[in-house]
Structure formats: C-alpha cells, structure tokens
Amino acid sequence: MPSVISFREATKIYRSSHLGRTIKKIGLVDFSIDVEKGEAFGLLGLNGSGKTTTFKLALGLLTPNSGTVKIFDLSPMTRSFYSRIGYVPELPYFHSFLTVKACLKFYGKLSGLSQADIQSNLDRVLWETGLVVYKDKRISELSKGLSQRVALAQATIHSPDLLILDEPMSGLDPLATRDLREYLSRLLEEGKTIFISSHSIFEIEKLCHRVGVLKEGRLIRILQRKDWVEFPGGLEGRFAEIVQNEGSTKALLRNSVK
C-alpha cells in the first residue's frame, strides 16, 4: 500500500530580485519522508526551518524545484482528492461577518458535502470542537482561541482521511489544547492520518508516533517514540540536543542548490 504522504528529495528555493541582483532563500532541501495511513507524524523546527514550506508543497500551493511530492500516490496538483484533506494554516482567516454555523456550512459545501451531510456533520464538529454555544456568534466576535477552534472544525467537517495542521494549538488555552489533543487522538483511532507542526513540543510528544526535526530547510533526524520516551527531558530535551549539536548548514546548502 502506498504511503499517504511521500516526499522524495524535494527541494524548494525561493528567489527574488533586488537592485538587479537575484536573492536566493532556502525553503527546503533534499527532503524525504513517508507518512503512513493512521500515523501522526510531527514536524519540529525553529522558526524558518521549513515546516510551512513542507505543508504548502504537500497541498500543491507550492511546487518543488526538484524532487517529488505525492499525496495518496498522486501529485498534489491533482485536485480531485482535495475532499480527502483537511488543512489548518498557521494564520487561519475567515469572513468576519459570517456566523460560526454559516462559516462551517460554507466550507462543508466547498468540500463537496450534500446539504444533508453538511447538517449532520455540522452538529458533530460543533460538539467535538466545543463550539456549540458559539454557533450563532459572528467570527468577528470570537477570541483567537475560538477562531482556532473554527479552523479545526472547518478542516474536519467533511471527515477527511488526512489532516495537515500547521501550528493548530496557537492561541488555545490549556483546557482547549487538551480538548484538541483528545479530539485528534479520536481521529487517529478512526484511522485518520495527521501531519502536524507545533511549537508546543509537549503536545507533539503526546500525540505523534514519529517526529521529523528540521533545521535551516534540511531534515536532520526522524525520531521514533522510543527515542524520546526514555530520554532525559523527553522530546523537548531530545530536540534541543539534536538542533544544538547539528551546527549550521546554510553555507553548505547555498553552494549545493541551484
């Protein structure tokens, strides 16, 4: 069975021009992973390490300069399977004049759900994400944490096989973070696949089966759960040790990419 997500030596270089000079910025270099069905795979890295670039490549929002990206064994540019994916971006935005209920109905329709399925799934995600009492509130009236719950609800209203979550815990209070973790754990039990990044290493540690560590656009380590369970300081300690000991690779990468 093919992997749900497969990267093979994927490289993304951003180029811009300034005063007649081309400026090259590394997004991702020679990135290779496989994420299997039913797995929670986490990405950890400092700001600018390539996490968001990875997600945008997986979604077909960017194309690699070299290498390949496959989702469900197809190119991300094959839009026919988009209904099988749920996405929470790092900075979600919704039309502020819509109510929570209207917003979720809109995304349900975009995902190809029938009116009957939209209504039954709406009740489910409102309950699962703790938004029942806010369903008639306008998006403009919500706190950042509640808006983040709406982001998760729109990503799961169509029961996707794959969730791609870029910093989904951002802005959530401790109780909301726990609720989100429990919700994602239930989705894993249903056989869903989760590809997630977060600066909340504690939450990644609890949820994920494997974790990839990124530094300066390069995947420097893939950790199994056993690699951090018995390590002093857990996943946070393991991550800090790996990143600090790896050293900078920017000069090497600048010379090696075209």
Image: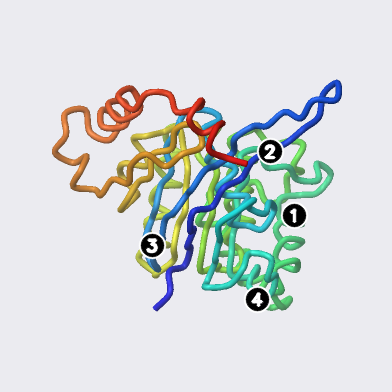
Q: In this view of the protein, which residue sits in the foreground, 253 or 188?
A: 253
Tell me the distance, in whole angstroms, between the alpha carbons under discs 4 and 2: 41 Å
Residue holding disc 1: 103
Mark 1 element type: helix
Which amino acid type is marked by label 3? Leu
Residue 93 lies, in percent from the top left, at 73, 42
The nearer-to-camera label among 4 and 2 is: 2
Closer to the N terminus: mark 3 or mark 2? 2
Residue holding disc 2: 14
Q: Residue at x 41, y 47 (%)?
A: 42
Above or below — where is 64 with respect to 26? below
Closer to the N terminus: mark 3 or mark 1? 1
The nearer-to-camera label among 2 and 1 is: 2
Question: Is mark 4 in CB contact (under 8 Å) with mark 3?
Answer: no
Residue holding disc 3: 188
Look at the image and tell me in which quarter the C terminus lies. top right
Closer to the N terminus: mark 4 or mark 2? 2
Which amino acid type is marked by label 1? Cys
The nearer-to-camera label among 3 and 2 is: 2
Q: In this view of the protein, which residue sits in the foreground, 21 or 56?
A: 21
Residue holding disc 4: 117
Tell me the distance, in whole angstroms, between the alpha carbons under discs 4 and 3: 22 Å
Circle 1 Cα neighbour tier, 10 Å, few/some/many (<14 / 14–19 / ≥20):
many
Q: In this view of the protein, which residue sits in the foreground, 237 or 20?
A: 20
Look at the image and tell me in which quarter the N terminus lies. bottom left
Closer to the N terminus: mark 4 or mark 3? 4
